[in-house]
Image (spheres, rainbow, N blue to C red):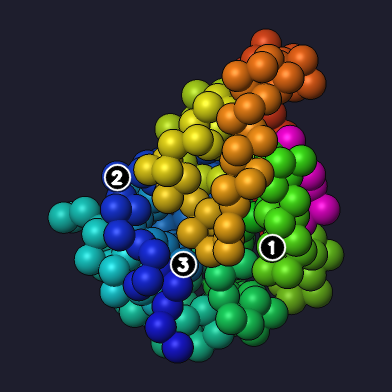
Amino acid sequence: MTPLYDRIGDGYAGLRRPDPRIAARLAAALGPSASLLNLGAGTGNYEPEDRQVVAVEPSREMIRQRAVGAAPAVQAVAAHLPFADGAFEAALAVLTVHHWPDPAAGLRELRRVTRGRIVILTFDPRARPWLTDYLPELAALDEAQMPAITDYAAALGPVHLEPLEIPHDCVDGFLHAYWRRPEAYLDPRLRSGSSSFRVLADPQAGLDRLRADLETGDWDRRYGGLRRINAYDAGYRLVITA
């Protein structure tokens, strides 16, 4: 099976840049560790620079876009990690679990090769940010591909959850990063940074409704309060093993 990002990953590095505030939350959640596995590493966003990191990524296109000097990358899939039991002190997986063909198997493998803390940034498929009012197919996609929050403990053992609020000026271009900048969703280039938009069959009707509501002021009448806050809980969660 061709990895998804071999098909849709062109230009990813230019649109998906690590936001320093999110990076700080991830680093704090990881705690001290010398060796780190970054699973589903993509182009290397959020890889700490102060640790020995090994990246695992199935997509050649993503590996090709990794910066010169980035951590070494192994082409492999989550369900079959080519490492010994307990090979890493800690592990990180950022917005990737929903892309794994077998998330449960991948999580079990992640636990097998990690002897310490695991930190996963994911999305709660029960969340309904305002964008799903215009594109309900996003909610259906999340329900189909995102593991339930309860699935993590079943595979990893005890975990605790932390909401990750997204700053209003987030520089990373994932799906709900533009929650306070609704006009951004009308830009096809910015939409292309989100895998969800790349796989939706036809989002145009919902985008047309959004454009119309922005022009008439209806969006601001319904959601304008968001323009006055600096961070938003769109449904992103840190899953942290005990």
**Kind of residue at disc 1:** Leu
Bounds of the magenta segment:
124-130
- The x, y position of residue 43, in whole percent, is 33, 57
Q: Earlier in the sequence, mark 3 or mark 1?
A: 3
Residue linked to disc 2 = 14
Q: Disc 1 versus disc 2: distance between alpha carbons?
A: 25 Å
Q: Which residue is mark 1?
A: 141
Is residue 146 positioned above or below 76 on the image? above
Point out the tag, 1 or 2, that comes first from the N-terminus.
2
> Which of pointers 3 and 1 indicates the residue nearer the eye?
1
Place of residue 233 in the rendered image (x, y in percent of width and height, measured from the top left): 72, 34
Helix, strand or loop status at disc 1: helix
As helix, strand or loop, the secondary structure at mark 2 comes to helix
Give the CA distance from mark 3 to mark 1: 20 Å
Measured in 3D between alpha carbons, the distance from the residue under mark 3 to the one under mark 2, in whole angstroms, is 18 Å
Asked if marks 1 and 2 touch (Cβ < 8 Å), the reply is no
Which residue is label 3 attached to? 40
Residue at x 71%, y 41% (from the top left corner): 134
Predominant SS along the magenta part: loop
Residue 22's place in the image compared with 150, above or below, is: above
Circle 3: element type: loop
Please name whichever residue, 177 or 112, is drawn nearer the observer in this view of the structure: 177
